[in-house]
Amino acid sequence: MKRRKLYEGKAKVVYETDEPDKLVLEFKDEASAFDGLKKARVEGKGALNNAISSALFELLESRGIKTHFIKKLSEREMLVYRAERFPLEVVVRNYAAGSFVKRYGVKEGTPLEPPLVEFFLKSDELHDPMVCEEHVRALKLAPPELLPEMKKLALKVNEVLRELFKKKGIRLVDFKLEMGILPDGNLAVVDELSPDSMRLWDERTGEKLDKDRFRFGLGDLLEGYKEVLSRLKN
Ligand code: UDP
């Protein structure tokens, strides 16, 4: 398959293929946090995130949820549909953590029932400011009539992933989704679904198995990600 580099981000490289509606995502061995302020090379992270993302996208697809995923191509590469992406991060929270704790002063781990959906503008320079539906409309970040569908999609993804992780003894605390419109016109989940973009806590010990290990130096990043993958595979 012919490839032409389209874009290189912090954690992935995106390539065009000889088919105009398909892209290759290559997962890099780079960890970054705090809007790119903290960075490190972590050998093996790309392969783990590709494997975890692919497994989660396959599960979502099997449950009738639209995603850009086509197939896992190789250890670090995934084939996806090209989507018209919105510059939005859709965050779903089941428990308080991260920026929610900072912003609202609640204790980490406080249950949020029903799960909360938040929107953020995807912009490192602006530090991903939170936006409300009126901002999405005013700044034309996405078609406003799609917002209810985006929320519904985010909550459906939450239901499926939360149940899966629960079976594996993992608590899905929160996660970030990106969304876009596929070539067939459907709203779909794009980007990745990995411990880089979700908080996963061991149900029994409370151990953090996600990128917070890197953000706050809580232990070896790879060990957490490996644990997540091995539980998904069992
Ligand atoms: N997240 C992400 N990319 C971002 C911001 C957040 O993947 O640019 C994920 C993060 O890993 C967590 C969830 O979205 O699982 C909620 O993040 P939060 O708003 O608490 O922000 P953070 O703690 O990253 O500042």
Image: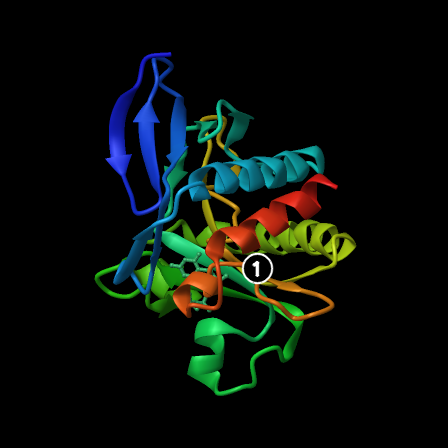
- Residue for point 72% across, 50% down: 164
Above or below residue 85? Residue 167 is below
- Return the x and y of residue 32 as percentages of the image width and height: 33, 55
Amino acid identity at mark 1: Leu
- Return the x and y of residue 134 as percentages of the image width and height: 39, 66
Question: Where is the N terminus found, in terms of image quarters?
Answer: top left
- Residue for point 65% across, 71% down: 206
Residue 191, can we see it? no
Residue farthest along the bottom direction in this orientation: 105
Above or below residue 194? Residue 115 is below
Q: Secondary structure at mark 1?
A: loop
Residue farthest along the right direction in this orientation: 167
Quickly name the residue at label 1: 209
Q: Nearer the viewer, residue 76 or 141?
A: 76
Task: Tell me if the residue at label 1 has its CB under 8 Å from ligand 1.
Answer: no
Left or right, residue 50 beside residue 227? left
- Return the x and y of residue 155 as percentages of the image width and height: 63, 56
Above or below residue 159? Residue 5 is above
